[in-house]
């Protein structure tokens, strides 16, 4: 069991697939930190960071899983540097600030991202220094699909929605998030 699993992403907007990953990560680590991107490395446009943090907090509160928490650490790190906060820098900071041994700190990714990790900024160093947990997709839904439907004014299937959020949160995203 890992000490801390770090689940980063845009969460733009969060959905049931994200929740499934949080819960699976909680089975594999004592603590799960859910870390929404402050500035996406690919320059992806995202809803306001504070809004995404709020949505994730609502989800985690609804889950009532003490091991899972939301962190705004990327916003803190971004204040000291231009550009995105890369995964390696995030893990390096967390290892130092939380006093966690490198191999007890695990980055949570999907199988698709696992294949891309060596090409990440300092990806080879990340793979040597930190642990990686690959969690398979359990719900066939993507944030991009939600955004597309919302922007077209279409209703979202209930089973795509994250617990703790309601359709109004997603409608708000259609206005604020694109």
Image: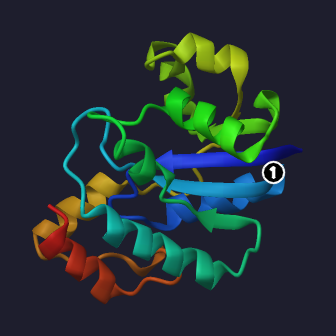
Query: Where is residue 65 drawn, in percent x and y?
Result: 73, 74
- The answer to whether any part of residue 160 appears in the image is no
Residue at the location (57% across, 57% down)? 34
Residue at the location (39% across, 52% down)? 75
| Mark 1 element type | strand
Query: Where is residue 178 drawn, in percent x and y?
Result: 14, 61
How is colour applied across the structure in the image?
A: rainbow
Position of residue 165 in the picture relative to residue 145 (left or right):
right
Give the quadrant of residue 151. Answer: bottom left
Position of residue 113 in the picture relative to residue 143 (left or right):
right
* Residue named by callout 1: 29
Query: Where is residue 130 drawn, in percent x and y?
Result: 71, 26
In the rendered image, the residue lying farthest to the front is 80
Seen in the picture, residue 48 relative to 121 is either above or below; the reply is: below
Query: Where is residue 138 drawn, in percent x and y?
Result: 59, 54
Residue at the location (52% across, 21% down)? 117
Instruction: Judge by depth and name the residue closer to the eye, 137 or 55.
Output: 55
- The answer to whether any part of residue 102 appears in the image is yes
Instruction: Judge by depth and name the residue closer to the eye, 23 or 92.
Output: 92
Q: How many marks?
A: 1
Seen in the picture, residue 127 relative to 20 is either above or below; the reply is: above
Seen in the picture, residue 122 relative to 150 is either above or below; the reply is: above
Q: Residues within 10 Å of mark 1 (few under 14, many from 20)?
A: many
Position of residue 63 in the picture relative to residue 167 (left or right):
right
Quadrant of the frame with the N terminus: top right
């Amino acid at each position: 069991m890992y000490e801390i699993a770090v689940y980063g992403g845009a969460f733009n907007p969060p959905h049931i697939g994200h929740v499934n990953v949080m819960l699976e990560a909680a089975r594999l680590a004592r603590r799960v930190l859910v870390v929404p991107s402050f500035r996406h490395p690919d320059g992806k446009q995202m809803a306001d960071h504070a809004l995404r943090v709020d949505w994730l907090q609502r989800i985690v509160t609804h889950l009532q899983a003490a091991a899972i928490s939301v962190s705004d650490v990327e916003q803190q790190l971004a204040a000291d540097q231009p550009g995105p906060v890369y995964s390696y820098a995030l893990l390096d900071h967390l290892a130092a600030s939380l006093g966690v041994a490198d191999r007890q700190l695990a980055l949570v990714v999907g199988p698709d991202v696992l294949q891309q990790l060596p090409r990440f900024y300092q990806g080879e160093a990340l793979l040597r220094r930190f642990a990686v947990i690959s969690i398979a997709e359990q719900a066939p839904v993507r944030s991009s699909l939600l955004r597309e439907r919302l922007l077209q004014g279409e209703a979202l299937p209930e089973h795509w929605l994250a617990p703790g959020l309601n359709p109004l949160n997603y409608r708000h995203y259609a206005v604020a998030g694109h």
